[in-house]
């Protein structure tokens, strides 16, 4: 059964006053960023090429640091098979990729972005949010379809539980 989340399910106070930079996203990244923005959050969105243009580096750590200096309070750099890197003024987090067979990469970024929005708006820790987003992207990449392949939260939790027990 699919769970539908509504405005009242999000705790926007968790991110009040934050500027969020999401580096690298799929074709729904703009709508996801606008969703966060329309929820009262400041969001900076770009892919790694855009970060390089903005910061003169492709290095995730240096690029994220530069984005923080430009005003972002959370910088997230998707690194494909190398996982995801995030940085705030208080913490640096690297989450390794979820190893799953890849059938079709289309939609993986969209799934990542959707799970990222969900975790941030639900008030999850940044680490939990990134783990769920990574798992969502990996699940979609392991499926043949794209739009119909978006995972449920239960599927994400199952993948994460296998990773912990492995």
Image (cartoon, rainbow, N blue to C red):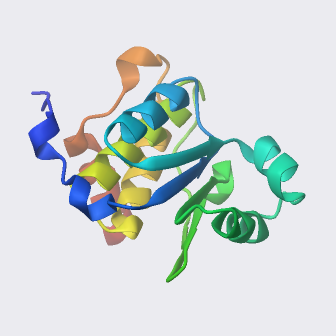
Between 102 and 156, the one nearer to me in the picture: 156
In the picture, the quarter occupied by the N terminus is: top left
Q: Where does the image place residue 164, in percent across and percent down from the top left?
A: 34, 69
Tell me which residue sits at (36%, 16%) in the image. 148
Q: Where does the image place residue 142, in percent across and percent down from the top left?
A: 49, 33
Tell me which residue sits at (37%, 53%) in the image. 132
Where residue 117 sits, quadrant-wise, is top left
92 vs 158: above or below: below
Q: Where does the image place residue 109, in percent across and percent down from the top left?
A: 55, 35
- In the picture provided, is 50 more to the left or to the right than 83? right
Tell me if residue 25 can be seen: yes
- In the picture provided, is 42 more to the left or to the right than 35? right
In the picture, the quarter occupied by the C terminus is: bottom left
**Outermost residue, bottom direction?**
90
137 vs 74: above or below: above
151 vs 41: above or below: above
56 vs 25: above or below: below
Q: Where does the image place residue 17, in percent across and percent down from the top left?
A: 39, 61
């Amino acid at each position: 059964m699919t769970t539908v989340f509504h405005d009242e399910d999000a705790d926007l106070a968790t991110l009040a006053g934050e500027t969020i930079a999401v580096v690298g996203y799929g074709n729904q990244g703009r709508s996801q960023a606008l969703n966060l923005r329309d929820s009262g959050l400041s969001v900076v969105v770009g892919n790694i090429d855009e970060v390089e243009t903005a910061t003169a580096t492709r290095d995730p750590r240096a690029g994220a640091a530069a984005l923080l200096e430009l005003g972002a309070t959370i910088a997230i750099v998707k690194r494909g098979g190398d996982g995801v890197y995030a940085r705030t003024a208080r913490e640096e987090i690297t989450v390794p990729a979820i190893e799953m067979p890849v059938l079709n990469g289309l939609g993986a970024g969209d799934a990542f972005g959707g799970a990222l929005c969900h975790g941030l708006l639900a008030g999850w820790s940044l680490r939990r949010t990134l783990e769920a987003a990574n798992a969502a992207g990996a699940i979609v990449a392991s499926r043949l379809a794209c739009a119909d392949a978006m995972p449920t939260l239960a599927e994400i939790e199952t993948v994460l539980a296998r990773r912990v027990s492995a």
